[in-house]
């Protein structure tokens, strides 16, 4: 049985992603949360390529954006024409686990969700906790 986007999304809903919210982005999912009081935005991205009968996980990463740093950094980057995209972040990291994983059958979704949950607990959440305070 081929894997559909709906099946993949339902599988991703089983993740324990703490207090992050999920949104569908172009060729991926973003899990995000904002701490407006402290001016911190955190984003976890799962990017994939969508083929006829399968998905291939292309990227898994986390980004942390500090408003207090970006308000000084972005004008400087703009001044020297170095800010090329609308997306900026203060700290980011790409994680290798799951990269290139082909999701062709429903059981592959279960395997990816399980692997991704372990990645969240062992690498992504510790990265976010370590770097989400500017102090």
Image (cartoon, rainbow, N blue to C red):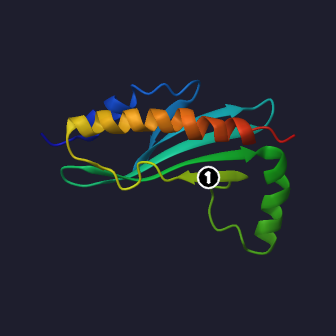
Tell me if 54 is positioned left or right of 69 in this view.
Answer: left
Q: Residue at x 49, y 53 (%)?
A: 96
Q: Secondary structure at mark 1?
A: strand
Q: In terms of image quadrants, where is residue 88?
A: bottom right
Say which quadrant the C terminus sits in: top right
Mark 1 burial class by Cα count in 10 Å: few <14, some 14-19, many 20+: some
Q: Which residue is mark 1?
A: 93
Front-most of 90 and 113? 113
Q: Residue at x 77, y 67 (%)?
A: 77
Front-most of 50 and 11? 11
Say which quadrant the N terminus sits in: top left
Residue 7, x across and y down, in percent: 26, 34
Q: Residue at x 15, y 43 (%)?
A: 2
Q: In terms of image quadrants, where is residue 128?
A: top right
Front-most of 123 and 43? 123
Residue 84, x across and y down, in percent: 64, 68
Residue 43, x across and y down, in percent: 60, 42
Residue 34, x across and y down, in percent: 68, 33
Tell me if 79 is positioned left or right of 59 in this view.
Answer: right
Residue lying farthest left? 1
> 72 above or below 115?
below
């Amino acid at each position: 049985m081929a894997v559909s986007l709906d099946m993949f999304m339902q599988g991703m809903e089983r993740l324990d992603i703490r207090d992050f919210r999920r949104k569908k982005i172009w060729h991926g999912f973003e899990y995000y949360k904002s701490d407006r009081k402290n001016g911190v935005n955190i984003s976890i991205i799962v990017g994939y390529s969508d083929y006829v009968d399968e998905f291939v996980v292309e990227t898994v990463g986390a980004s942390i954006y500090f408003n207090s740093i970006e308000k000084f950094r972005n004008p400087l980057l703009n001044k020297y024409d170095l800010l090329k995209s609308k997306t900026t972040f203060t700290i980011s990291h790409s994680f290798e686990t799951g990269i290139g994983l082909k999701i062709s059958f429903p059981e592959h979704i279960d395997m990816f969700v399980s692997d991704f949950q372990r990645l969240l607990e062992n690498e992504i959440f510790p990265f976010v906790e370590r770097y989400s305070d500017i102090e």
